[in-house]
């Protein structure tokens, strides 16, 4: 489609190919640090909001207590789900980074190296809810292979320059 004699052709076709070749994916160690820091931030969001709310209604602290004979606390799980959407979607959607990614000098991009779309960011956050999803990064072999929350919305976590 590109005609070298046409001065009106878009010149970025070659630039995109070069940019894709320059993308260096984050290491597993960087991804692990991202996960740990971002998980701590989400937990702090939940506990901080509960602390603030408990100043007005002390009965809210009952949410922290698991039900008798229950394997997990569904209320806390729902609050963590909400905290992840409140944290990841704006951070990755507007800035392409989270606090964990800032620490490890990595960022989220689409497969062409551009900032991810809002749909991709929502897909990443939704895919994080798949059980055992965080360990999928350990079982990837190819250089461009990644965790499910990268593969499903077609994004990458790359080293920032």
Image (cartoon, rainbow, N blue to C red):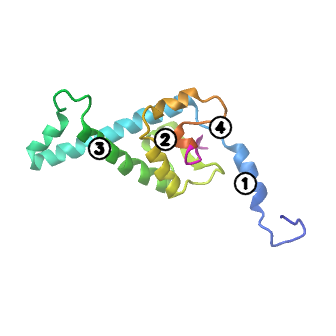
Instruction: Tell me the residue at 29%/43% (across/down).
Output: 78
Task: Give the Cα separation between the discs numbered 2 and 1.
Answer: 24 Å
Disc 3 secondary structure class: helix
**Does the residue at mark 4 contact the one at mark 1 (Cβ under 8 Å)?**
no
Q: Which mark is residue 16?
A: 1
Q: Residues within 10 Å of mark 4 (few under 14, many from 20)?
A: some
Disc 2 secondary structure class: helix
Read off the residue under disc 3: 78
Q: Quadrant of residue 11?
A: bottom right
Instruction: Tell me the residue at 40%/35% (across/down).
Output: 37
Nearer to us of marks 4 and 3 is: 3
Find residue 31 and report its horizontal and vertical position in percent.
51, 34
Q: Is residue 144 left or right of residue 9?
A: left
Q: Is residue 20 left or right of residue 151?
A: right
- Numbered range of the magenta stretch: 152-161
For residue 149, above or below residue 15:
above
Q: Residues within 10 Å of mark 3 (few under 14, many from 20)?
A: few
Q: Earlier in the sequence, mark 4 or mark 3?
A: 3
Find residue 93 and report its horizontal and vertical position in percent.
48, 55
Task: Give the Cα separation between the discs numbered 4 and 1.
Answer: 17 Å
Instruction: Tell me the residue at 54%/36% (across/down).
Output: 147
Q: Residue furthest right?
A: 5
Viewport quadrant of the N terminus: bottom right
Disc 1 secondary structure class: helix
Q: Earlier in the sequence, mark 2 or mark 4?
A: 2
Q: Earlier in the sequence, mark 3 or mark 1?
A: 1
Read off the residue under disc 4: 144
């Amino acid at each position: 489609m590109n005609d070298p004699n046409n001065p009106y052709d878009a010149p970025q076709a070659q630039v995109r190919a070069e940019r894709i070749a320059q993308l260096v994916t984050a290491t597993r160690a960087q991804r692990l640090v991202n996960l740990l820091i971002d998980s701590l931030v989400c937990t702090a969001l939940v506990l901080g909001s509960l602390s603030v709310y408990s100043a007005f209604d002390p009965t809210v602290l009952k949410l922290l207590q698991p039900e008798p004979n229950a394997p997990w606390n569904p209320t806390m799980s729902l609050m963590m789900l909400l905290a992840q959407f409140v944290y990841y979607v704006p951070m990755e959607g507007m800035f392409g980074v989270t606090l964990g990614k800032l620490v490890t000098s990595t960022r989220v991009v689409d497969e062409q190296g551009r900032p991810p779309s809002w749909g991709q960011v929502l897909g990443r956050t939704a895919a994080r809810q798949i059980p055992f999803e965080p360990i999928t990064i350990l079982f990837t072999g190819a250089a461009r292979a990644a965790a499910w929350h990268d593969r499903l919305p077609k994004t990458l976590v790359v080293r920032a320059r």
